Image (spheres, grey):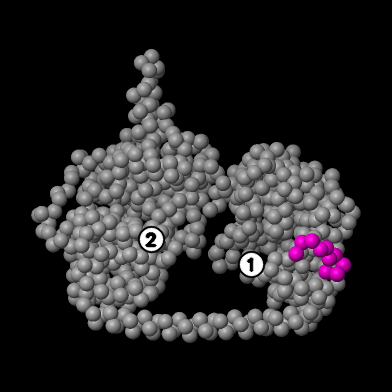
Amino acid sequence: MPRFSVIVPAYKVQAYLHDCLESVLTQSYPDLELIAVDDRSPDACGAIIDEYAARDPRVRPVRLPENQGLGGARNAGMREAHGDYLLFLDGDDTLAPDALRAIADRLKETGEPDILVHDYARTHWDGRTVRNQATLELTERGPAPFRLEDRPGLLHLLMVAWNKAYRREFVEQAGFAFPPGSYEDTPWTYPVLMAAETIATLDRVCVHHRQRRQGSILGTTSRRHFDIFEQYDRVFAYVEKHAELACWRPVLFRRMVDHLATVFTRRDRLPREYRAEFLRAARAHCRRYRAPGHPAPPGSRLRHALVRLGLHRAFQALRLASAVRRRSVKAAGRLLRGLRRVALRLHYRVQLRLPVCADRAVFAAHGGRGHGWDPGALETAFRTHAPHITTAWIARPEHHHTIPTATRRVTPDTAAYWTALARSKYLVHNADFDRRLVKRPDQVFVQTQQGTPLKHMGLDLQERPAAARDTDFAELLRGVDQWDYVLSGNRHSTLTWERVFPGRYTTLAHGRPRNDVLLRATSADVARLRESLGIPKGTVAILYAPTHRDYRRTQRPPLDLDRLLRRLGPRFTVLARAHPTHGGSPAEDAGTSPGIFDVTDHPSIEQLCLASDALVTDYSSIMFDYANLDRPIVIHTPDREAYEAARGTYFDLRSFPPGAVADSEDELIDIFATGHWRGSRSAQLRAAFRERFCPWDDGHAAERVVRQVVLGESEAALPPVVPLAERHPVPSAAAAFARSALTTVPQHAGPRTVTDLV
């Protein structure tokens, strides 16, 4: 008897069925049977199912003599099922990687409940993936399992069959089955949830629900949407048959009105000539099943009233008025924005005619982000070594909390913003300020760049259209002409910047200011940072920081963090940080594993480096900064050929790596499991890497920049660079723990290794 019976109905989904079946059969939890039901599909679905059945004995094909619809096909699959739990998956959807293992673990944790409700994400045809917004209802905190009355908010989730796992014996004993027609999930899901004695939740994306551009059943304009009335008749008939469920009538009534209103207001569902009839039927149903005691929320009361009363013309008038109001608001907004732009432009022109203030400096980071990176380190150094300079930081309002209290906060595209750009003598950025900036002769522009370049940059992108995208190279060079100084952390950076960003600027070969904190931190700082992040004591914290893929529309990370931690065990934790240009996180689909920390929104990458014990990255420039800590670095490059083709790198990372290199996830796991990540070979590679790319990062880079640019000191008068051999970066917490443990080993104890202690 398999653990899971995954039932997949197939009808006119030949373009998606391969992905669906493959997502099930490649699960890391193999104890399953896949019941693929050919619902008399006129396309190649039946042939595809036969191919998989011939290849994998876990596939059990079911062929229906005539089309029975989604409900009938699922019922046919249930009759053939032998698994402990039933899962339903539409033929155009997919299971997330490791979903069945996560479900199996949660079922075991919660004592084999009747139902396990898990999360899903909508995968749009244009590549976007959006997680369900009602995730809060799936929290795993609190007692488990529970009954529906303990968490009635579950009824507000999408009423579908494929976001749950069902204990087969529970379904068979209760006699549950899917009815014919559309909206068949409604009379299945409500009764199942109400009848379940035990329910549990799993806060993890287990299903990717495909949002097809065309062809979905519910997106078809026809009379079939009238089936919804018969389906709710079945729901309330079930409640009437079971007197103990009468308390749910008010909730079900409100959900029904919500559902009817949604169907009516969606323009892609009801033909125009049937809309009045639909609303009359909705009024009849509301009168039949009305149950006082559960009022609609204030924002929905008008819509509910119009549905209950069947006021078709009033509903149409309300929609028309809402549309007129929206258009009026948009038009007024456009007018106000236009007037504001004109006013700000005039303000900027006035400010440009006023003298430059020699005691002002303005700083910013790429994307309007908060205080940090090289500009942040320089801003702090300005206040320390040139206190007569008043500093300001440009950032979006949501990042203002990261700006020091001694620094003025400036919001982009405001009057204060244009005043700062026009009047400040020093302009510091790691990209470029507004393209409308007019740099004045008395102003000094310090371009910090965003790290040591590994991937192709600047003019080199002219031959890389996938990476360059819509880059205006003439505009890029116009920005370069505004630079007075460019920071460099090593000779490789100096040579690259001067070639790919040709200009008349001066290169400041003083090191990277953002790395000063890495060289000055203490063990107490590391302990404090780990405690603030919640990293358990005695564990090895891996900082996972993948870079952006220019050749991909979506940025799903190539590493399964849940699987990584399961294989490595509880002595490891992962700090997952997405690239700043990403909308998500590497930990987004990783569930609620206690060893995974989503630190994408943490304001300081330097603090995360200090808190971690090792770095896993691919082509990110963070490896050059992290090397200053002399801690293990592991390179994970499963898509090396694709990345090289799309973006390209300035040197072969495999021939000159900062540590061990893994081409696959299994190789990465093996590197950590065997201890190679911190072995002698890794240390040798890291030493050579540091010598080449960290020559000037000694903790005084920002000071040298300020003293030369602001105070006018000559290079000979600047603090000399501390030789690499004389630098002693703070050890990682794991290394410090290992050293302390070794010093306390009793004399009679046998030999122990660092690996044993960590």
Residue 264 place in picture, x, y as percent? 74, 74
Dot 2: element? loop
Front-most of residues 623 and 402: 402
Q: Relative to the observer, which residue lies in front, 478 or 232?
A: 232
Question: Quarter of the image containing the C terminus?
Answer: top left
Q: Which residues are magenta?
A: 286-295
Residue at 15% across, 50% down:
719
Q: Residue at x 72, y 56 (%)?
A: 155
Kindly identify the residue that appears in the image at 38 percent across and 18 percent down: 746
Query: Where does the image place residue 64, in percent across and percent down from the top left?
Result: 81, 57
Q: Is residue 729 left or right of residue 53?
A: left
Vertical position of residue 268 compared to residue 149: above or below? below
Q: Quarter-wise, where is residue 423 in the image?
A: bottom left
Going by the numbered disc 2, the residue's amino acid type is Gly
Q: Is residue 290 visible?
A: yes
Helix, strand or loop for disc 1? loop
Residue 127: image location, x then y, percent: 55, 64
Label 1 packing within 10 angstroms: few (<14), some (14-19), many (20+): few
Image quadrant where one finds the N terminus? top right
Are there few (<14), some (14-19), or many (20+) residues within 10 Å of tag 2? many
Q: Residue at x 40, y 82 (%)?
A: 341
Spatial CA span between label 1 and label 2: 38 Å
In the rendered image of this protein, does residue 329 appear above or below residue 10? below
| Residue in front for this viewpoint, 403 or 283 | 403
Residue identifier under label 1: 212
Q: Which residue is mark 2?
A: 370
Characterize the magenta stretch by its predominant secondary structure: loop
**725 falls in the magenta region:** no
Q: Is residue 121 left or right of residue 631?
A: right
